[in-house]
Amino acid sequence: MKSIKLLFILFFLSASFYAQTPTDYLPAEFHKERRNMLRSKMSKNTVVVVFANPIRNRANDVDYVFHQDPNFYYLTGFREPNAVLVLFSDNQTDDSGVVYNEIIYVPKKDSRAELWNGKRLGVEGAKKELGFTMAKTAEEFTEQPIDFTKFNKVYIKKFEDDYRNSLNKFGETYDLVNSFKRNSDYKIATLISEPKKKVYELIKSTPIENAANVAQVLGKVITYYPDLGEDELIQGYRNTTDASKIKDIKEKTSLKLNVKHNINTTFLSSKMAEMREIKTPVELKLLTKAIRISAVGQIEVMKAMKPHMSETEIQGIHEFVYKKYGAEYEGYPSIVGAGNNGCILHYIENNKTKVGHDLVLMDLGAEYRGYTADVTRTIPANGKFNTEQKAIYELVLKAQNEAIKVCKEGTMFWSPTQIAQKIINQGLADLGIISSVTEKHSYFPHGATHHIGLDVHDPGTYGELKENMVITVEPGIYIPDGSKCDKKWWGIAVRIEDDILITKGEPENLSGEAPRTVEGIEKMMEKKSVLDEFILPNLDE
Ligand code: GLY
Ligand code: MN
Ligand code: MN
């Protein structure tokens, strides 16, 4: 018995050794448990339909690197495009008596396609590795369509309709979504476009005596949505002052608005937000790893930074560290902005050829097994903060420290932002950058917190903070060239961003190993870097 066990272990070890692919993804049980939790929130005779992300074209025959839709991944663990998850509230029985309460539709195995684009899991893989008892090919979703009209509610995310039709292929997102639209109430639900719905609602709810005012407003609306001008009811409404005609139009808009259908586009997002905002232990493990990798990236850059470096090169050092740890992506386009470039909140060109003696704002996050960090450090390229840089930095740090202190269970979500705003306003006034604490300004134009997880801006309910949420705390001050203050402050941009685990007790700073204080950063920047010796040939001579 012992030797059989040993053989089994050896076989397992050698198999995973030869496969040599990561084994620490979320386990199938996690996704199954999440599906069960979502199902428990659904009312009787309802169904959730979630589509995988489509492939997006970059240029000609080159596509963007595929990234799974986070909701789809959360519920399935499937990392390929052109797939659908159908989750039923109640057991269903097929023609052969098989009982099931969920189906995953996945691309079928295809040796030719796999030769070019990599292995597919296929139907059997989806059963074996993802733990689905009912898995079918994507084609089956279109060829043996489910009649979605028979359910009390069909929960979907609103379609953006931004996928290509490659014509010569079947089972692609375009076909899957169209099949769903054909076999559901979707057409009825979207008979009236969103802008038209808003206008109809306005007409319906406005008392007849105020119709002239609304008709005037509609004139402006039509300049943005010319199609609305051709709508018979809207046209009629604008062209009459006759009370009985207006009454008639109001009744007709009301009838059109009341068309019955079973499509619901809010339930899924709101339930996913409720579930995803609280991280389970397996999620926390991966998210913490992503965060620590990003913190190490910041540390290595602090050691390696030199004034002659370009923003691009600095970005490359962070991302090299991520890859060295096996992180598959960056969670969002990396931001490396020297001096005035740091004032652009989502600056991603990163193409300044020399960072010089400016502050360099570096907002980057590794994505590890789907989970993304979001960490910002702002450091002086030459290793020492000058007087003005230090004054602004210390102010942002104070705001961040005070905001972090309140990040505990029970605090309202926006409270850290309000605390940071108050401190920054007071500090800017004390430094003479604004004339008084009440002066309106745009030196801190964003909120200080958001959830992180499978999305860098992860969904949440934005009420009270709860145990096992992970949020950023990221105050900043940005003083672009030409601002209405003393020139000595121009081009200074500071953001400090850490990823905080909410507990019942004290907040836990998961990115805290990257120094944040002026002294801590300057000390780290004095250290040697292995990259000091990494000198490549000059190709420009
Ligand atoms: N990196 C984007 C953000 O900080 O929200
Ligand atoms: Mn952030
Ligand atoms: Mn960030």
Image (cartoon, helix red, strand yellow):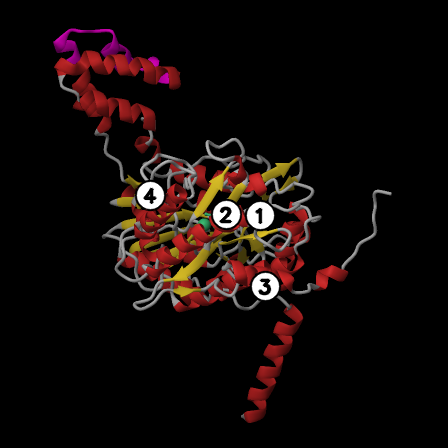
Which of the marked residues, 2 or 4, is nearer the chain's N terminus? Answer: 4
- Looking at the picture, which amino acid does disc 2 mark? Val
Q: Which numbered tag is attached to residue 359?
A: 1
Numbered label attached to residue 523: 3
For the N terminus, the image quarter is: bottom right
Q: Which residues are magenta?
A: 227-246
Q: State the residue lying farthest toward the bottom.
A: 2
- Relative side of 419 to 333, left or right: left
**Magenta residue check for 239:** yes
Name the residue that disc number 4 marks: 148
The first of marks 4 and 1 along the sequence is: 4
As helix, strand or loop, the secondary structure at mark 1 comes to strand
- Residue hosting label 2: 494
Distance in Å between CA atoms under marks 3 and 1: 16 Å
Disc 3 to disc 2, C-alpha distance? 19 Å
**x and y percent of residue 369 in the render?**
52, 60
- Residue shown at 73% from the left, 60% from the top: 532
Q: Distance from label 2 to label 4 (Cα)?
A: 52 Å
CB-based contact (under 8 Å), mark 3 and mark 1: no
Mark 3 or 4 closer to N-term? Answer: 4
Residue 390, relative to residue 326: is it above or below?
above
Query: Identity of the amino acid at label 3?
Result: Lys
